[in-house]
Amino acid sequence: MTEQALIEQALAGDEAAMRALYETHRPRVMRLATALLGDADEAEDVLQDVMVYALTRLHDYRPERAAFGTWLHTITVSRCRDRARRRHAAGRRMAQWLGLRAPHAREPERSLDRLDAADRVGRALRKLTPLQREALVLREVEELSFREIGYVLGVPLRTAQTRVNAGYAALRRELGQDGESAEGGV
Amino acid sequence: MARAPRAGSDIMPTEHLSLEQALAHVLGTTAANERASVEEHSARCDACAKRVERLRAEREEVRRDLLDYAGRARPTRASDWAAVEHRIVGERRSGWRATWRLALGSVGGLAGVLVLTITLAAAAAGIAVSWPAAGSAVRGTLDRVPVLQRLAPTATATSTPLTPAATDEAPVVTTPDDRADLATAVPGVPATPPASPTAEPSPAADSSPSPSAMPSATPTPGSYGGTADVRGQEDSATSAQPPTEVSDRSGRTGGRPTMMPRGSGGSHGPTARPAGVGPSTPARAPTDSGAAAEPTAEPTGHGMPGRGAMDPPPGRATSRPTMDRP
């Protein structure tokens, strides 16, 4: 059954179709939320919010504009922004952030050894600006096209490309890989 | 190291790709017009080709790490969907509730506005409107609006307090001295009240509207101010006022004394003051009875009857309580 058929059945109130949509898109939404928020528990909350919002407002979805998954990404990014804003306003995790802040890329290697590669890249990801992080995650994790990234973020295609470039360059700096040109001897 | 050209510009054959250009090429963000030249240069320049390959491998590694980092969510459980389903049901219910609340509130508000509009328009036009259920509440509210009383003086003065015409212009003769002064000032006014309430009034007293003031103060059927009183209709047969006038003015319900015809002999306030409305009414009652019990040599049954003459005849005694109606 195609996704559009599932959506139409869900619009008609078919619970099984709703559940199928949920199961299909849950991993991607969860992955995106985790990458943007850096917290699996918060990502679970965002996943619920996103799926409840989407499944109760299926009539707002326009298939001609974007794929259903891309629409879900739009909602996810919006929810993650709200979460990040609230978190920042409340200063809820400030202490934790200060205590566990990732070492600077130029700190000794022994500090980085304590973290595995995924943690390292995750902490480097959190150093990026939110706009850079969103664009980079949508490109590198969700593998969206630049046009889809522009749709999700509400920016032109060229802006999406620029943000991905800037985000990746910043991530490399955080990971200590910005000496590539010197090492490469080019 | 070769001077790196800026991104977006054509790459000279003798120059190497800049890091920015190589990264853009790896990430696929190179502009379409530059992509061909970058690929051409990479095909000819081994150093740049190696650099691009290194960056591509690095990107794959970072992407794997990112996927590992982002994919650390726990596996799906059945309770996940149950929680989402529960919230969806709750959202739908709350949505329906909000819709119903909005609809009911809108209908109620529109009905209220409609009733108020009709009532105001009717009051302004002097048309009697009787709302079966909420009529008393609406009337009570409208009666307290001075603007409405000015707009429709014949239709909205239902329960207003006594006007100056009733309180100031209508002298209350309560003592023998007052009666003596009044008798001196007005020819034909007796200095003493009649000896008994059963004294027959003179023809002048018959024309006095004192008995007929009661029915004239009683609202007619369908009037704005109140309900009809059949006793008012009975009394209007013996009233000195024409029935039409009684009907017109009776729109002012509540026995307002201003409905008394001015200029008629002895048409003073005490006869028009409804019993129990003014504060002086209870005080007059013992005076009247006392005066009636006093023996007097003055003739009774003058044009200006005393308080005893104002008492209704026995046959009309039952009509007085209608004046108490607010």
Image: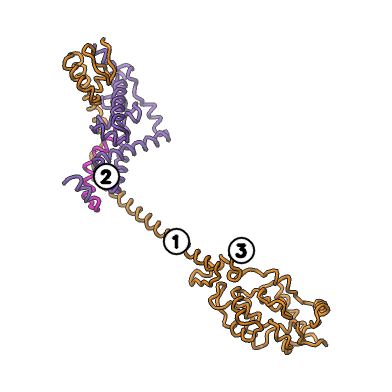
Residue located at (73% from left, 72% from top): B169
Q: What element carries label 2?
A: loop
Identify residue type, mark 1. Leu
Q: Which chain is disc 2 placed on?
A: A
Number of residues whose C-alpha sits closer than 10 Å to that of mark 2, classed few (under 14), some (14–19) or many (20 or more): few
Do pointers 1 and 3 mark residues of a single chain?
yes
Q: Which chain is orange?
A: B
Residue located at (70% from left, 85% from top): B207
Q: Which chain is purple?
A: A
Q: From mark 1 to mark 3, how far is it between C-alphas?
A: 25 Å
User: Residue B320 location, x and y as percent?
Assistant: 64, 81
For this rendering, which residue is in front, A128 or B108? B108
Residue A31 lies in the magenta-colored region: yes
Q: Which chain is disc 3 placed on?
A: B
User: Residue B79 location, x and y as percent?
Assistant: 26, 46
The number of numbered badges drawn on the structure is: 3
Which residue has dot 1 on it? B110
Which residue has dot 3 on it? B146
What residue span does the magenta drawing correspond to?
A: A10-36
Do pointers 3 and 2 mark residues of a single chain?
no
Q: From mark 2 to mark 1, how far is it between C-alphas?
A: 36 Å
Which residue has dot 2 on it? A62
- In the displayed structure image, the side of residue B161 where residue B133 appears, left or right: left
Q: Earlier in the sequence, mark 1 or mark 3?
A: 1
Q: What element carries label 1?
A: helix
- In the displayed structure image, the side of residue B28 where residue B128 appears, left or right: right
Q: What element carries label 3?
A: helix
Residue located at (55% from left, 72% from top): B224
